[in-house]
Image: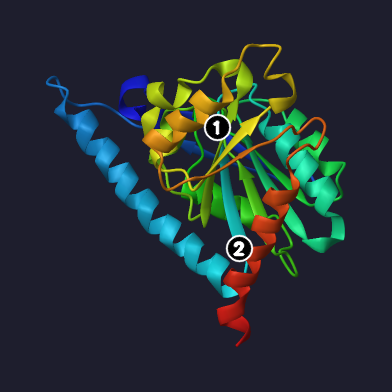
């Protein structure tokens, strides 16, 4: 995990960029003082404990505002941005939404998603290969969440490190592209085991790439029996309607206790 790749040291700069182009930068430095390797594990545990506390704070904030928060995760190229863009565009004014986008570099995805009319904030992580709860909390300060019912967090494209970090989300949504193969959940079980929803994307080209849908679904159910599964095409919109109905139901459930 992050203690192996080194990204939990957060050396460098993390930028949060809103529509107004306000910039907030913080520098994080970590120094190793151990020869036996045990110090790295202790630091990783400490970081996760702190993250979990901040995630609970985020979760309480979402609850108080009646906002359904999604953490969308996948490998690069699976179609996360296209999936989110299609969701925002099709739902329109039915579900007022906001987006937080995480990428190592560039704000290309954020610019693309802003075309939907929803407020979007970009987190540029530099060398950090995942988002953390405090990054999300700081990004939320750049969004006017009045009236927002749905907050979508597009995590950094990575199937390993993001799985370890709770952002305070209500639902963890994992995407699997048909071009990645049916066994991806077996290779990266931690991510899929923690998923509430698994989206099989690019189903419109499944036959062309020899994707075995039944095998993929069986594999997902084996690793993530708790997950709701849909196969969709973000490009064509095929199969998206059940996803939208699910979101509307989840939002209603989230808001009902507050409104009564």
Residue 88 on image: x %, y %: 79, 48
Q: Earlier in the sequence, mark 2 or mark 1?
A: 1
Q: Residue at x 26, y 37 (%)?
A: 43
Indicate the quadrant containing the C terminus: top left, top right, bottom left or bottom right.
Answer: bottom right
Marks 2, 1: nearer the viewer: 2
Q: Secondary structure at mark 1?
A: strand
Residue 77 on image: x %, y %: 65, 21
User: Which residue ends up furthest to the top in the rendered image?
Assistant: 209
Whether residues under marks 2 and 1 lie with C-beta atoms below 8 angstroms apart, the answer is no
Q: Secondary structure at mark 2?
A: helix
Q: Is residue 134 left or right of residue 146?
A: left
* Residue 198 visible in the displayed image: yes
Q: Determine whether 24 is above or below 253 in the image.
A: above
| Label drawn at residue 250 | 2
* Mark 2 crowd level (few <14, some 14–19, many ≥20, 10 Å Cα): some
Q: Residue at x 56, y 74 (%)?
A: 64
Q: Which residue is mark 1?
A: 13
Indicate the quadrant containing the N terminus: top left, top right, bottom left or bottom right.
Answer: top left
| Label drawn at residue 105 | none
Residue 213 on image: x %, y %: 58, 25
Residue 132 on image: x %, y %: 47, 44
Q: 257 and 215: which one is in front?
A: 215
Q: Determine whether 213 is above or below 123 in the image.
A: above
């Amino acid at each position: 995990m992050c203690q192996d790749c080194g990204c939990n040291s957060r050396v460098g700069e993390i930028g949060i960029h809103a529509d107004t182009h306000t910039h907030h930068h913080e520098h994080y430095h970590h120094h190793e003082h151990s020869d036996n390797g045990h110090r790295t594990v202790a630091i990783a545990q400490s970081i996760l404990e702190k993250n979990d506390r901040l995630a609970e704070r985020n979760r309480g904030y979402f609850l108080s505002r009646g906002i359904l928060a999604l953490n969308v995760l996948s490998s690069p190229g699976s179609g996360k941005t296209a999936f989110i863009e299609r969701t925002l565009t099709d739902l329109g004014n039915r579900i007022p939404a906001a987006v937080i986008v995480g990428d190592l570099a560039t704000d290309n995805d954020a610019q693309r998603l802003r075309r939907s009319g929803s407020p979007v904030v970009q987190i540029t992580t530099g060398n950090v290969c995942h988002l953390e709860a405090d990054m999300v909390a700081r990004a939320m300060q750049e969004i006017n969440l009045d009236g927002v019912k749905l907050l979508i967090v597009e995590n950094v494209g990575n199937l390993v490190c993001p799985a370890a970090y709770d952002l305070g989300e209500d639902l963890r949504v994992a995407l699997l592209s048909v071009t990645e193969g049916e066994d991806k959940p077996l290779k990266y079980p931690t991510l899929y085991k923690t998923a509430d929803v698994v989206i099989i994307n690019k189903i419109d080209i499944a036959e062309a790439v020899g994707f075995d849908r039944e095998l993929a679904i069986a594999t997902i159910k084996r690793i993530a029996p708790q997950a709701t599964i849909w196969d969709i095409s973000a490009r064509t919109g095929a199969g998206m309607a059940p996803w939208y109905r699910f979101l509307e139901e989840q939002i209603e459930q989230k808001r009902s206790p507050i409104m009564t």
